Image (cartoon, rainbow, N blue to C red):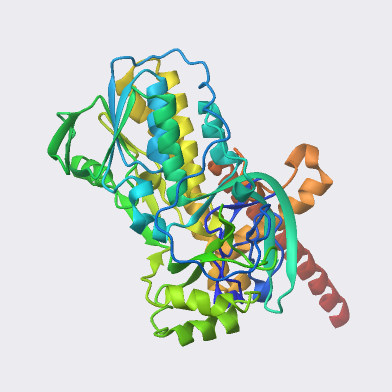
């Protein structure tokens, strides 16, 4: 998770998805979606608390290269029984990240031959990607897709998250416990799913690394790639764009549909990573525990915030002043690592007017990227793969219907997630009740908490916003936020009217 000096945070490690009661994902700094506790100045800060043993203090080891992905505890479980409906069809997936590899498995399970093209090297060989990799916590929403495929998740202690920890500026620590979440570095998750795809579908899925998409002939259903072996033209029956925020497949769709709109919004934050630190820290400070007993993590500032930090001494001053809870020995070690590191952007928000074209569909960050604020990026991408699996089954072998069916099944929820992600940034703006987004989210949580206690049989067990980690649809959550905020506004309006009538009556009586 990322931490922010504006809330006197800690330098954090598990960046992307933390969870509140059993899976409502938590962020860098966030509007208290589930089990969070109040931080300084109205900010909410949560971070995962790992179950791994604490490491003994020791010197900072040399920076390691690409680390090996976690091994599964057992061979992949047999995929759920599925009668293949698309045998003989060929799919091309662009992007071998978590979404691309998971989508490939859903396609192969339906009998398709799948070629996955990735412009970067394989994650285990990609030192650049490994060096900037952030942490992803796979929560129940994302786990559902992997469970459907029979993909096992590692159970070693360093991959388990036990809860969230909150630091305030006085150094006080609050802990809430959750179970069932699994933690990966982004590059490790990508490699893990590549390995699982190869093991589960050794002849149906082929990966091609170092192959960049050059262009797409949508009418001719051909995608051209350039790589170490030269130019390759790959024919397809279905093209899946899982190639990230800067998606070339999405650009091809925009060229095919001039009226297609894509809104891109930056998170306004950037981060740097530290690696390989040893110390007895948990639950005193956030960090991701590695299999070798060291810790890695990230520190985040507003975009441009690193520009005023030129020397290691500048970073040491910032860390000591703003990041409460860091072990003293870590401060110079982190400063030495990050001083010459180029900050990475902490995510963008993508909203597409459509997710499909003839024989083409988009999923993951290419279709619906979000910022880390609610920790839904990778989990929503995995869920989109599960939806693709459902759509393939519902289409009954009619592959040409799949892209439009996918948009119909997923677009509303992705727009809803985009809306929620945007509203969450009201907690960074710090305008309080003067901010309509802040007021709407706050009203929902307050009204929902009260009603869930008074009439749980009618309302439910908790406000919908606190169920982001579950399989509750994003559109259901946004509808609940709007409904409850309107109810709160109506209640306050009625109260104001009643008080106004009472005051008018009193004034009239006094005048008589």
Front one among 408 and 8: 8
- Please give the name of the residue rendered at 40% of the width and 24% of the height, measured from the top-left corner: 201
Measured as percent of width and height from the top left, residue 18 is found at 60, 53
User: Split into 4 quadrants, where in the image is the C terminus?
Assistant: bottom right
Query: Viewed as shown, does residue 403 lie left or right of 500?
Result: left
Query: Viewed as shown, does residue 180 lie left or right of 240?
Result: right
Residue 100 vertical placement versus 390 (above, below): below
- Please give the name of the residue rendered at 71% of the width and 79% of the height, measured from the top-left corner: 170
Query: Viewed as shown, does residue 7 lie left or right of 490?
Result: left
Quadrant in the picture for residue 447: bottom right
Front one among 414 and 89: 89
Query: Viewed as shown, does residue 354 lie left or right of 469?
Result: left
Front one among 70 and 494: 70
User: Split into 4 quadrants, where in the image is the N terminus?
Assistant: bottom right
- Please give the name of the residue rendered at 38% of the width and 60% of the height, measured from the top-left corner: 265
Front one among 493 and 177: 177
Note whether residue 265 is visible. yes
Note whether residue 489 is visible. no
Q: Residue furthest left?
A: 230
Residue 295 vertical placement versus 20 (above, below): below
Residue 330 vertical placement versus 481 (above, below): below
Total numbered labels placed on residues in the image: 0
Quadrant in the picture for residue 229: top left
Measured as percent of width and height from the top left, residue 199 is found at 43, 28
Measured as percent of width and height from the top left, residue 483 is found at 63, 49
Measured as percent of width and height from the top left, residue 258 is found at 21, 45
């Amino acid at each position: 998770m990322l931490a922010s000096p504006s809330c006197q945070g800690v330098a954090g490690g598990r960046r992307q998805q933390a969870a509140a009661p059993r899976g409502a994902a938590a962020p860098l700094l966030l509007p208290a979606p589930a089990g969070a506790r109040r931080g300084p100045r109205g900010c909410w800060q949560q971070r995962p608390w790992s179950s791994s043993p604490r490491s003994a203090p020791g010197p900072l080891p040399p920076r390691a290269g690409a680390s090996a992905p976690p091994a599964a505890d057992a061979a992949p479980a047999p995929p759920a029984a599925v009668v293949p409906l698309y045998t003989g069809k060929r799919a091309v997936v662009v992007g071998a990240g978590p979404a691309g590899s998971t989508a490939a498995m859903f396609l192969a399970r339906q009998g398709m031959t799948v070629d996955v093209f990735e412009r970067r090297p394989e994650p285990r060989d990609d030192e650049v990607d490994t060096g900037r990799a952030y942490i992803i916590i796979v929560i129940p929403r994302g786990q559902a897709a992997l469970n459907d495929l029979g993909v096992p998740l590692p159970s070693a202690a360093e991959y388990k998250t036990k809860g969230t920890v909150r630091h305030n500026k006085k150094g006080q620590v609050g802990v809430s416990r959750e179970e069932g979440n699994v933690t990966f570095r982004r590059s490790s998750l990508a490699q893990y799913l590549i390995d699982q795809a190869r093991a589960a579908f050794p002849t149906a899925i082929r990966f091609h690394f170092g192959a960049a998409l050059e262009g797409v002939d949508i009418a001719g259903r051909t995608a051209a790639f350039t790589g170490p072996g030269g130019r390759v033209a790959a024919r397809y029956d279905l093209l899946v764009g899982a190639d990230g925020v800067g998606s070339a497949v999405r650009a091809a769709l925009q060229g095919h549909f001039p009226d297609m709109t894509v809104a891109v919004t930056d998170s306004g934050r950037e981060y740097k990573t530290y690696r390989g630190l040893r110390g007895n820290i948990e639950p005193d400070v956030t960090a991701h525990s590695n299999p070798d007993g060291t810790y890695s993590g990230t520190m985040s500032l507003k975009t441009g915030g690193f520009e005023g930090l030129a020397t290691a001494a500048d970073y040491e001053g910032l860390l000591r002043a703003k990041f409460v809870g860091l072990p003293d020995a870590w401060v110079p070690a982190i400063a030495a690592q990050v001083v010459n590191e180029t900050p990475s952007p902490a995510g963008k928000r993508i909203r597409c007017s459509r997710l499909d074209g003839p024989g083409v569909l988009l999923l993951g960050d290419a279709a619906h990227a979000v910022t880390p604020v609610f920790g839904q990026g990778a989990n929503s991408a995995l869920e989109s793969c599960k939806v693709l699996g459902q759509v393939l089954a519902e289409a009954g072998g009619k592959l040409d219907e799949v892209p439009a069916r996918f948009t119909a099944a997923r677009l509303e929820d992705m727009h809803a997630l985009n809306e929620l992600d945007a509203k969450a940034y009201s907690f960074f703006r710090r305008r309080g009740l003067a901010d309509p987004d802040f007021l709407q989210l706050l009203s929902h949580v307050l009204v929902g908490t009260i009603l869930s206690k008074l009439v749980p049989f009618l309302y439910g067990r908790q406000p919908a916003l606190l169920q982001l980690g579950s399989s509750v649809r994003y559109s259901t959550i946004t509808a609940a936020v709007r409904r409850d905020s309107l109810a709160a506004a109506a209640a306050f309006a009625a109260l104001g009217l009643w008080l106004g009538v009472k005051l008018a009556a009193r004034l009239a009586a006094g005048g008589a």
